[in-house]
């Protein structure tokens, strides 16, 4: 089983729709969780950290389910500019020194 | 604008050659890490430096090595290049070294092609 798994998509979604992605992780000792956004041929940029209580930032909501070992990202009222690859990242229990483990990313295409 | 700059942006090498990639971090960012991102994959952690010492390493062979300098710059060196080393190499920096010490800022990357 891969450490961090995501559905690669692509997800083709009409503008204004709601879309949700899940990401599963295998290391139950993982400490921190993140969603990054990566545009084509660009660097990843932090979209949201994911907390146990869940967190919301505008149209974006992230949830963590430790029991089932997955995190989710919900995008409401999707915009054309939301088209990108969304990377899930997990930080291990070794502190920051073990780096982030990324999934392969989910490709999202918002259609007009 | 993340304040993390990498050079060169693109380069082409042949198998067996050596390459040095450079990164300049934001002032005060004493932790720098390097990632390899192959086409269609997520970034993979190569190693991390904190205050000029390597303090974490992913599953990469010793021919991948690095340096961090007091002026917040760093290098990734790869010896004996292989075709599979073709990838986008990302430098990332932040304050501190713990898991909750703030956002990781990525540079735009150096795209390496090995022929």
Image (cartoon, coloured by chain):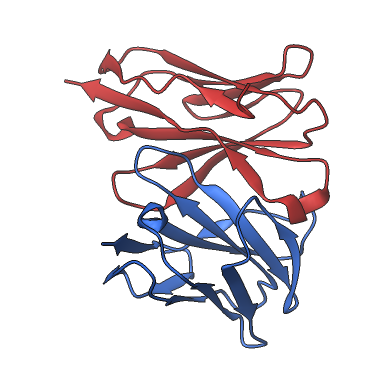
Chain colours: A red, B blue
Give left or right: position of B61 versus B16.
right
Q: Residue lying farthest left?
A: A112
The quadrant the C terminus of chain A occupies is top left
How many labels were placed on the picture?
0
Quarter of the image for residue A90 reads top right
Query: Which x, y percent locates residue B46?
Result: 60, 57
Query: Which x, y percent locates residue B23?
Result: 49, 75
Give left or right: position of B100 versus B88.
right
Q: Residue at x 64, y 85 (%)?
A: B69
Q: Residue at x 53, y 33 (%)?
A: A103
**Of residues A62 and A43, the one drawn nearer to the viewer in this rendering:** A43
Query: Which x, y percent locates residue A58?
Result: 50, 29
The quadrant the N terminus of chain A occupies is top right
Give left or right: position of B41 versus B59.
left
**Of residues B71 and B57, the one drawn nearer to the viewer in this rendering:** B57
Q: Residue at x 33, y 12 (%)?
A: A17
Quarter of the image for residue A81 reads top left
Quarter of the image for residue A28 reads top right
**Of residues B97 and A17, the one drawn nearer to the viewer in this rendering:** B97
């Amino acid at each position: 089983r891969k450490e961090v798994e995501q559905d690669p998509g692509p997800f083709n979604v009409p503008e204004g729709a709601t879309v949700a992605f899940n990401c599963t992780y295998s290391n139950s000792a993982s400490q921190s969780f993140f969603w990054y956004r990566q545009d084509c041929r660009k660097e990843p940029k932090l979209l949201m950290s994911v907390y146990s209580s869940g967190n919301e930032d505008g149209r974006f909501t992230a949830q963590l389910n430790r029991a089932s070992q997955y995190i989710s990202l919900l995008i409401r009222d999707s915009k054309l500019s939301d088209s990108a690859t969304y990377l899930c990242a997990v930080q291990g229990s070794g502190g920051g020194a073990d780096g982030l483990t990324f999934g392969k990313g989910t490709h999202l295409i918002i259609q007009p | 604008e993340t304040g993390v700059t990498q050079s060169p942006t693109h380069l082409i090498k042949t198998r067996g050659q050596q390459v040095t990639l450079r990164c300049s971090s934001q002032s005060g960012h004493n932790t720098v890490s390097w990632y390899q991102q192959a086409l269609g994959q997520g970034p993979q952690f190569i190693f991390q430096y904190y205050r000029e010492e390597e303090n974490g390493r992913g599953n990469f062979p010793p021919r991948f090595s690095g340096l961090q300098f007091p002026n917040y710059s760093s290098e990734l060196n790869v010896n004996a290049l292989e075709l599979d080393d073709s990838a986008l190499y990302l430098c990332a920096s932040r304050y501190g070294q713990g898991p909750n010490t703030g956002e990781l800022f990525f540079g735009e990357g150096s795209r390496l092609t090995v022929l």
